[in-house]
Image: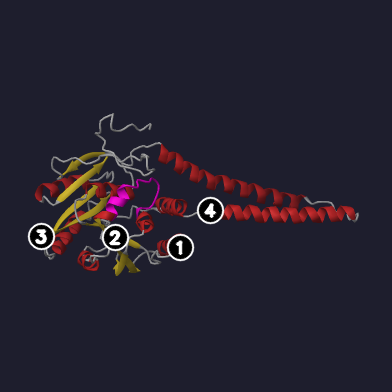
Amino acid sequence: MTNSTLSLIIPVLNEVEVLPALVSRLNQVTQQLENVDVEFIFVDDGSTDKSFDLLKELSQRDDRVKVLKFSRNFGSHHACLAGLARASGERIIIMAADLQDPPELIPDLLVAAKSSVDVVWAIRKAREETKWVLFFAGLYHAFMKRFVFPTWPGEGADVVLMTRRVRDALLAWPEKNTSIFGQIFWLGFHHTTITYAKGKRFAGKSKWNFSKRLKLGLDSVVSFSFLPIRVISYSGIALSLVGFLYAIVVILFRLLNITQVSGWASLMIVLLLVSGLQLLVLGVIGEYLWRSADQVKSRPFYVVVDELGFGKSREPAMIHAKKTGMGLPRTYPAESRESDYNPGT
């Protein structure tokens, strides 16, 4: 019987305290898999500790361990993208390195990945987090489910298994400032779910601070929802209607010789309200414009400065967005000839 292949992609950012335990549990789990050849792709997303040195040592001891090192921190979603570009497995799993998502999920994901299923989500049925983290996470997932994707899991998902054709579709759609999980949902492949309990972080501190969570929320809303623009339109219509009605009242008062001296307070309230709305409108439009400008610059999504365990075959070290004649983005290797790749076209 021909063995199936599995690629496990794990972004890493300053996880030197977690990596030994993570690798140990991964070995225990994958040894139980029958007729499955596994590769571990660790993507060092600009770590400043000894994470890369430890990964380098692991790669030298185990030829299943492959490592990509970024020149700086580009973000976990771009780390996932880099791992997808180098994954060779028929099925691919994306999983965090902090052991909050247990590696013991891997056999369950493979069992759920039947022949007709392209995506398997591991849905959190419980999680051990602070109240503030739970509150904002719940708010984010509720918004995504209500306004963006009706099938979005309300409890959230941090682990996903996909087939190679889903991976190919993602790489054909290089989009900056977005959510890779949102992209998978948008693609619309046949998916199913399993549930698990998300535990506490094994060691160290979470790298997902408030600013990163906020950026993810903004990226998800702007990339996949027209709600901000629609809210602005409705607000403009509502204020215009109020202004029109107030103008009628002023005219009637004038015709009836009912003169009222306008107060400073009411004038300032109207001024501040309208000025605030204008700034809000400019801010939302600016979010869209900045993302559009960042996308069309065709800067690399990430830069790989070192790679271990991949042999002589070199895949793209950088991913650019470029429009083809069909209007679809393509990926280009960093070492392409000038005649093959012209970022100005």
Residue at the image point whose x is 50% and y is 54% from the top: 226
Q: Kindly identify the amino acid type of the residue bearing the numbered disc 2.
A: Val
Calculate the distance from the C-alpha at mark 4 to the C-alpha at mark 3: 51 Å
Q: Residues within 10 Å of mark 4 (few under 14, many from 20)?
A: some
Earlier in the chain: of badge 4 and badge 3, it is 3
Q: Kindly identify the amino acid type of the residue bearing the numbered disc 3.
A: Thr
Looking at the image, which is closer to me, 308 or 86? 86
In the rendering, at what x and y percent does residue 306 appear?
Answer: 21, 39
| Magenta-span inclusion, residue 241 | no
Q: Quadrant of the N terminus?
A: bottom left
Calculate the distance from the C-alpha at mark 2 to the C-alpha at mark 1: 21 Å
In the rendering, at what x and y percent does residue 135 appear?
Answer: 44, 64
Residue receiving disc 2: 160
Secondary structure beneath dot 3 equals loop
Secondary structure beneath dot 4 equals helix
Residue at the image point whose x is 28% and y is 32% from the top: 340
Q: With respect to residue 142, does 312 lie above or below?
A: above
Q: Quadrant of residue 4?
A: bottom left
Residue receiving disc 1: 139
Residue receiving disc 3: 2
Q: For this view, does 246 lie left or right of residue 80?
A: right
Q: Identify the magenta region.
A: 166-180
The structure's colour scheme is secondary structure
Earlier in the chain: of badge 2 and badge 4, it is 2
Q: Kindly identify the amino acid type of the residue bearing the numbered disc 4.
A: Pro
Calculate the distance from the C-alpha at mark 3 to the C-alpha at mark 1: 45 Å
